[in-house]
Amino acid sequence: MQKRYAGLALLIAIILMLGAASADADMRVSGTLVGTLTDSMTVQLEWTVESLADIEGLIVWRVVNPTVNSGAIITPDALPAVSPGSYEDLVLELEPGLNEIWYRLYAVHSGGEEAPVDGAYCEVYAMQTPVDVRTWSGIKALYK
C-alpha cells in the first residue's frame, strides 16, 4: 500500500513541477535592447518585444559596476508596454575609470511578477574623458 501512495505522491509532484514550468514558460518573452551613447552623459535605449500579451509594463535595469553592486532599476515606475519603445538614461553617477554600462529590460506581467525579457540586454561603452580634436584627427588618420 505504501508503494502505491509513494507512486501517487511522485506523480502529483511531477504534475505540479510541470505546471510550474509551464507557468514560467508562459511568462517568457523575447526581445532586443540596443543602447547608444548620444553624448558624454546620455544613453538612448531602444527595444522591441515580440509579444506584449499579459505584459502591463516594462522596467529598465542598469549596472554601472558589477563588482560593487548588482544593479538598480532606473525607471521608478513601469514604462508603458509598447514595442518598439525607447528610454533616455542620463548617466551622471559614473565613477572615474568606469566606462561600461550594462542594461537589461524586464517585463511586468499582469499579476505583478517581473521577468527578464530574453535577449533584451546590452552593454554601452562610455568615454568619460573627452578626446581633443587633434587626437581624434590623428586616430582617424590611422584608419584611412
Image: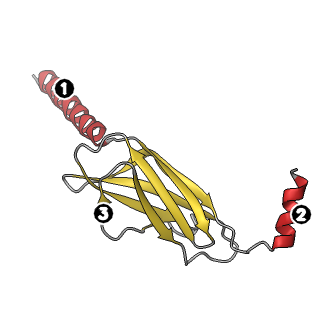
Circle on res. 78: 3
Q: Is residue 12 visible?
A: yes
Q: Position of residue 55 (x, y in %)?
A: 25, 49
Q: Is residue 70 left or right of residue 57?
A: right
Q: Earlier in the sequence, mark 1 or mark 3?
A: 1
Q: Disc 2 residue type?
A: Gly
Q: Is residue 63 left or right of residue 74?
A: right
For image coordinates 86% across by 60% down, the residue present is 139
Q: Disc 1 residue type?
A: Leu
Residue matched to label 2? 138
> Between marks 3 and 2, how big is the CA–CA gap?
45 Å
Circle on res. 11: 1
Residue with the most extreme left position? 1
Q: Position of residue 90 (x, y in %)?
A: 51, 73
Element type at mark 1: helix
Q: Is residue 71 visible?
A: no
Q: Earlier in the sequence, mark 3 or mark 2?
A: 3
- The image quadrant that residue 51 belongs to is top left
> Between marks 1 and 3, how big is the CA–CA gap?
40 Å
Of residues 24 and 96, the one nearer the viewer is 96
- The image quadrant that residue 25 belongs to is top left
Q: Is residue 114 left or right of residue 127?
A: left
| Mark 2 crowdedness (10 Å alpha carbons): few <14, some 14-19, many ≥20 | few
Task: Tell me the quarter of the image containing the N terminus.
Answer: top left
